[in-house]
Image: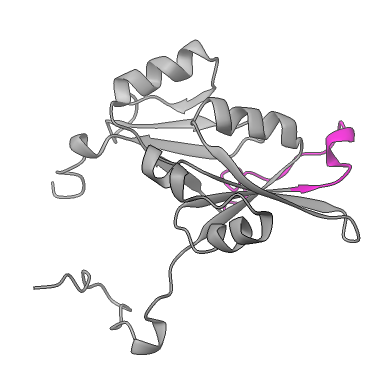
C-alpha cells in the first residue's frame, strides 16, 4: 500500500491539482557571499549549481546542493539548461546576497532563533554524527548544542557565518525519536 502520510489535526488529503509539486529550495539571506559559500561548500560539501545576478535590483542568488557522482553527470553544462534543471531539484539551498551588506560593519540578518523567534533552522542528515561533530570541531564551527547536551540527545546544532542554526542528525540514531 502506498504511503499517504500521517494524520494530525489540520492535515487534509493532497488534492490531485498538487500532483508534481515539490519543495525545491529554502532561502537564507547572507551578508558576505564569499564567506557563506566557503562555509557551505567546505563544511557541508555543497556544490554551487547556479549563480544568478540581478544588477537592476542589486542582489545575487546562489543555488547550492549536495550531488552524488550519478547526479553530477546529470547537471547540464549550458547555463539556461542548468537553470531549468536546478529549479526541478529537491533539497536546494538558496543564498541571497543583497549587494553592499558585506561592507556594513553594523549589519546582520536576524537568525530567527533570537527574540522574537520566527524561522528556526535547516537540517543536514549525516552518515555518522560523531564524525560530523569531529569535522565541525576541526574546522572551528560554532556549536549551539552538542549531541550529548540538553534533553534531546543525538541531535546537534551549529551556526553558519550569518548566525543561522543548522541541525545535524544521524537517521540511524533517531528511530525512537518522539515515541517515548
Please name the residue shown 13% across and 46% down the image: 180
Q: Is residue 82 visible?
A: yes
Horizontal side of 101 relative to 84 (left or right) equals right
The total of numbered circles placed on residues is 0
Placement of 42 over or under 1, stated as above or below: above
Query: Horizontal and vertical percent for residue 121?
Result: 50, 46
Give the magenta range. Answer: 97-118
Query: Horizontal and vertical percent for residue 22?
Result: 43, 68
Location of residue 162 (image quadrant): top right
From the viewer's side, name the closer residue of 2 and 114.
2
Placement of 12 over or under 72, stated as above or below: below
Is residue 111 within the magenta segment? Answer: yes
Please name the residue shown 50% across and 64% down the image: 88
Is residue 160 within the magenta segment? Answer: no
Q: Split into 4 quadrants, where in the image is the N terminus?
A: bottom left
Please name the residue shown 41% across and 46% down the image: 71
Location of residue 129 (image quadrant): top left
Query: Horizontal and vertical percent for residue 9?
Result: 28, 76
The colour style of the image is one colour
Horizontal side of 96 relative to 104 (left or right) equals left
Horizontal side of 19 relative to 94 (left or right) equals left
Magenta stretch: dominant secondary structure: loop
Q: Is residue 148 visible?
A: no
Query: Horizontal and vertical percent for residue 103?
Result: 89, 34
Location of residue 125 (image quadrant): top left
Amino acid at each position: 500500500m502506498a504511503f499517504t502520510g500521517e494524520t494530525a489535526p489540520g492535515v487534509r488529503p493532497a488534492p490531485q491539482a498538487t500532483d508534481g509539486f515539490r519543495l525545491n529550495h529554502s532561502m537564507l539571506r547572507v551578508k558576505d557571499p564569499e564567506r557563506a559559500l566557503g562555509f557551505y561548500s567546505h563544511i557541508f560539501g555543497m556544490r554551487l549549481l547556479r549563480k544568478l545576478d540581478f544588477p537592476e535590483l542589486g542582489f545575487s542568488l546562489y543555488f547550492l546542493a549536495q550531488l552524488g557522482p550519478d547526479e553530477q553527470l546529470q547537471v547540464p553544462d549550458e547555463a539556461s539548461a542548468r537553470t531549468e534543471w536546478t529549479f526541478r531539484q529537491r533539497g536546494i539551498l538558496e543564498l541571497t546576497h543583497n549587494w553592499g551588506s558585506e561592507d556594513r560593519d553594523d549589519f546582520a540578518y536576524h537568525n530567527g532563533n533570537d527574540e522574537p523567534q520566527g524561522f528556526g533552522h535547516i537540517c543536514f542528515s549525516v552518515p555518522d554524527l560523531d564524525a560530523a561533530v569531529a569535522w565541525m570541531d576541526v574546522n572551528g564551527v560554532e556549536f549551539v548544542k552538542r549531541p550529548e547536551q540538553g534533553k534531546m540527545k543525538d541531535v546537534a546544532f551549529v551556526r553558519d557565518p550569518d548566525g543561522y542554526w543548522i541541525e545535524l542528525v544521524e537517521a540511524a540514531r533517531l528511530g525512537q525519536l518522539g515515541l517515548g
